[in-house]
Structure formats: structure tokens, C-alpha cells
Image (cartoon, rainbow, N blue to C red):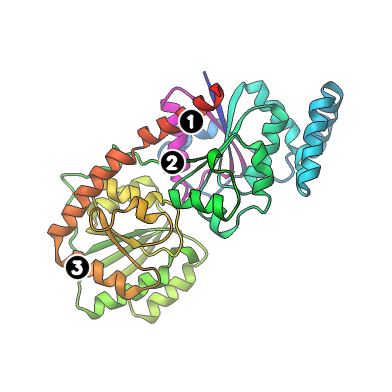
């Protein structure tokens, strides 16, 4: 069986169902994914399928090397001095923290070889990528990496161009991202593949026996600055002022929870906007099936899976015209896009859909067709597996 090692910053995570779904899809394809995570992630994550992956999950942590790593590094220096020294020189050229990480990754690289891992893949260009490039260099196993949003626009590694030598190819989730990677970060366009993460269109599907609640609005998002949640509160205030009857459910947790709760109280919207905390995939699907409109007021986005899940269930979406979103949400066909930082613009489109359920149904049906044809997890997983295969045959 072909074994793939996923190196991740944390696993499992409430907001990264796309990683779990990709792991499960590769498993369905007859591959055997193993996870090497730097952190144990969040407590209580209960997404369906996570228990299937945890038995093949190892946690590295900041002290994974320790004395064992030093001994492994010494052994590698004695048994294959040429290869070890080449990696060591590369690590020193990259600068801190790579020389230390080279020692820490020695036992991990040895374990990858013992497992017969044929490919290393990383999601996000953060700390896990630093570990992975050295694990790949030390073990001789090819490496690919998917870059998303914050790891490009907010906190890109300053040494991305330098580590590109150790990356077989990059994957990113939109053409906008690819242009940013080449024009702003200086990465090589010929090494970049564009592939949005997929959605399980069988699991996230409409349900004939579930009645849509005419005034229910749903947002699924991490409660963080880039999600624009204060504009959500402003849009809710506008909708109430205009006389709309609605209930707005927000699924998610994050650092801005208390600030958003304060904004809801300041606008006296406690009975209209409800922060219900993080939810698993079953919670998201249930709420989507009951909702008339899905809303994401983001200030920055790559290609968020929450849009894909909403369209796959057949819910009309209202989002912001930022970065890669127009490639995912087809304005006027699968939903509406408005300028970011405008609660008034959000309220206008949401109110229109609440008043015109026939339009919302039409947009939702088009969104479902678009998701099945272009964003299916099975299709996207097959494309990624094909990229791995093509890379081996080059």
C-alpha cells in the first residue's frame, strides 16, 4: 500500500475539516495517510472520521529531537556522512531555526523511511513546512505543499523562496493565490498547481424532509479579525431596522468571541444573532439544511470550504468580493458578492433573498450543480493524487 505522510501544524482542528476530508479521501483511494503534527490541536474535535486517522498520527512537538535526535543525527553522520552533511550545509545556509530542526527531524526522517513513505505533503506554509523540508531532504522522500490564505497574505515565511528548492511542487487554492505567489513572493510559476480543496457533495447534500426556516441565516467561521464579523453585526442591525424577521446563527470559536458578543449586546441583537460555538460536520450540515442564506463577511480569503459546503447543500450565499472568492462564488449565479467592510451592502443582499425565496432557491440550486461539477472532494482528491503520480514520473 502506498503511504503518504501529512505534516501539519496541528491535528485535529475544528476549522480544518478540509484536511481531515482529504485524508479520508486518500484512504478511500487505497492510499494510507499518516499524520505527523507539531501540536495536538484543539480539544473535543468530533468531526466524523477523525477516529479513523488518529491511530496513524504522531505528535512531534518543539522538543521532538532531544537527545534521541542528537544520537540519530550522530548515527546518520557516521553511516551516510555525505548526505547528512549536504542537508546540514543547506540548513545552515537557511539560518535559524533550520540547523536545530535538522537535528530534531533526524529520527522522524528515519521513521518515514522505515514506514516506506513515498510522499510528504504539507498543508499551510508555516512551522510544519520548516520541519517537512528537512524531513524530505534528510529522507530523500519528495515533498509537496498546499498554501492557503494566512500563510500567503498575513504571515508568509520570509524564507519561502529559499526553501522552494526542497519542494517538489506547490499547490494553492485559487488563481489569485498563484499570481500572489509569483508576483509578490517570487515563487516559480511552473512549480505551482491551482487546486481548491474539495467538498464531500454526498455528505453535504440537500435533504428533502428538512424544512428551510424562512428567516434563518448561517455563518460558519473562525471568530477572527479576517472574517469581518463586526460587519456581520452591522448587517444584522440594518436588517432589524428594515423590519426583517430573522435568526442569525454563527458557528465557530476564536479570539474575537468576547468582542463580537459585546458588539451584539451594544446593538441589542442578543435574540437575533447567536454565537453557538464550534460545531462538527454534522452540526454544519444540519444548520445549512435549515438555512435560507449563508453569509461570510470576510476581509481576506483564499477559497474557504464553508462556501463549498453551503453551495453543496444548495444554500444561496452572500459573501465579499475579496482575493480568491470570485473564483468560487459565481456572483449572480450561485450567490451574491458585495464589497468588504460594508454591513449595509451585506444587509441589502441578505434582505433581498429573505424577501425573494424563489431567487434564493434558484441560486442554491445553481450552487449545488457548481459544487458537484467542479468542487467534489472525489474529483479534487483524484487530481491531487494524479499530481503526486505525475511528479514521480518526471
Q: Which residue lies furthest to the top in this view?
A: 1
Residue 169 got which mark?
A: none
Circle 1 residue:
387
Q: Earlier in the sequence, mark 3 or mark 2?
A: 2
Does the magenta portion include 9?
A: yes
Does the magenta portion include 310?
A: no
Q: Is mark 3 on a helix, strand or loop?
A: helix
Q: Residue at x 47, y 34 (%)?
A: 23
Circle 2 residue:
195
Circle 3 residue:
352
> Within 10 Å of the Cα at label 3, are there few (<14), some (14-19), or many (20+) other Cα atoms?
few
Q: Which of marks 3 and 2 is in front?
A: 2
Residue 257 visible in this rendered orientation of the protein: yes
Question: Mark 3 to mark 2: distance in Å?
Answer: 33 Å
Residue 8: quarter of image: top right
* Magenta stretch in the rendered image: 8-37
Q: Locate residue 161 relative to residue 202 in the image: left or right.
A: right
Q: Residue at x 28, y 71 (%)?
A: 347
**Residue 54 screen position, x and y as percent:** 53, 35
Question: Mark 3 to mark 1: distance in Å?
Answer: 43 Å
**Labels 2 & 1 near each other (Cβ < 8 A):** yes
Q: Locate residue 65 relative to residue 333 in the image: left or right.
A: right
| Quarter of the image with the C terminus in it | top right
- In the image, 301 versus 39, the foreground residue is 301
Q: What element carries label 2?
A: loop
Q: Locate residue 99 relative to residue 56 in the image: left or right.
A: right
> Within 10 Å of the Cα at label 1, are there few (<14), some (14-19), or many (20+) other Cα atoms?
some
- In the image, 252 versus 323, the foreground residue is 323
> Within 10 Å of the Cα at label 2, are there few (<14), some (14-19), or many (20+) other Cα atoms?
some
66 relative to 154, above or below: above
Question: Mark 2 to mark 1: distance in Å?
Answer: 10 Å
**Residue 196 screen position, x and y as percent:** 42, 43
Amino acid at each position: 500500500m502506498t503511504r503518504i505522510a501529512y505534516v501539519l501544524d496541528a491535528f485535529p482542528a475544528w476549522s480544518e475539516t478540509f484536511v481531515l476530508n482529504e485524508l479520508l479521501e486518500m484512504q478511500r483511494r487505497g492510499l494510507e495517510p499518516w499524520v505527523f503534527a507539531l501540536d495536538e490541536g484543539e480539544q473535543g474535535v468530533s468531526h466524523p472520521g477523525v477516529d479513523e486517522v488518529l491511530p496513524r498520527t504522531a505528535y512531534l512537538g518543539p522538543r521532538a529531537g532531544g537527545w534521541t535526535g542528537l544520537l540519530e543525527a550522530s548515527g546518520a553522520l557516521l553511516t551516510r556522512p555525505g548526505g547528512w552533511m549536504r542537508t546540514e550545509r543547506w540548513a545552515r545556509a537557511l539560518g535559524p531555526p533550520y540547523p536545530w530542526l535538522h537535528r530534531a527531524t533526524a529520527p522522524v526522517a528515519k521513521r518515514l523511511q522505515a514506514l516506506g513513505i513515498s510522499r510528504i505533503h504539507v498543508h499551510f506554509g508555516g512551522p510544519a513546512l520548516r520541519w517537512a523540508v528537512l524531513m524530505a531532504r534528510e529522507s530523500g522522500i519528495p515533498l509537496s505543499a498546499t498554501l492557503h490564505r494566512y500563510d500567503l497574505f498575513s504571515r508568509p515565511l520570509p524564507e519561502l523562496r529559499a526553501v522552494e528548492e526542497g519542494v517538489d511542487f506547490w499547490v494553492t487554492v485559487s488563481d489569485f493565490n498563484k499570481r500572489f505567489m509569483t508576483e509578490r513572493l517570487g515563487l516559480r510559476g511552473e512549480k505551482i498547481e491551482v487546486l481548491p480543496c474539495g467538498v464531500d457533495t454526498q455528505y453535504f447534500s440537500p435533504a428533502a424532509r428538512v424544512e428551510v426556516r424562512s428567516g434563518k441565516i448561517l455563518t460558519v467561521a473562525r471568530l477572527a479579525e479576517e472574517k469581518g464579523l463586526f460587519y456581520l453585526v452591522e448587517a444584522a442591525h440594518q436588517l432589524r431596522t428594515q423590519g426583517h424577521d430573522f435568526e442569525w446563527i454563527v458557528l465557530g470559536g476564536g479570539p474575537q468571541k468576547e468582542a463580537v458578543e459585546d458588539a451584539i449586546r451594544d446593538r441589542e441583537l442578543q435574540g437575533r444573532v447567536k454565537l453557538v460555538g464550534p460545531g462538527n460536520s454534522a452540526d454544519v450540515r444540519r444548520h445549512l439544511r435549515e438555512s435560507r442564506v449563508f453569509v461570510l463577511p470576510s476581509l481576506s480569503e483564499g477559497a474557504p470550504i464553508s462556501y463549498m459546503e453551503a453551495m453543496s447543500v444548495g444554500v444561496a450565499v452572500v459573501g465579499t468580493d475579496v482575493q480568491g472568492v470570485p473564483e468560487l462564488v459565481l456572483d449572480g449565479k450561485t450567490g451574491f458578492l458585495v464589497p468588504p467592510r460594508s454591513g449595509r451592502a451585506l444587509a441589502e443582499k441578505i434582505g433581498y433573498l429573505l424577501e425573494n425565496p424563489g431567487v434564493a432557491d434558484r441560486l442554491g440550486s445553481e450552487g449545488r450543480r457548481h459544487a458537484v461539477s467542479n468542487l467534489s472532494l472525489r474529483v479534487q482528491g483524484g487530481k491531487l493524487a494524479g499530481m503526486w503520480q505525475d511528479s514521480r514520473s518526471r
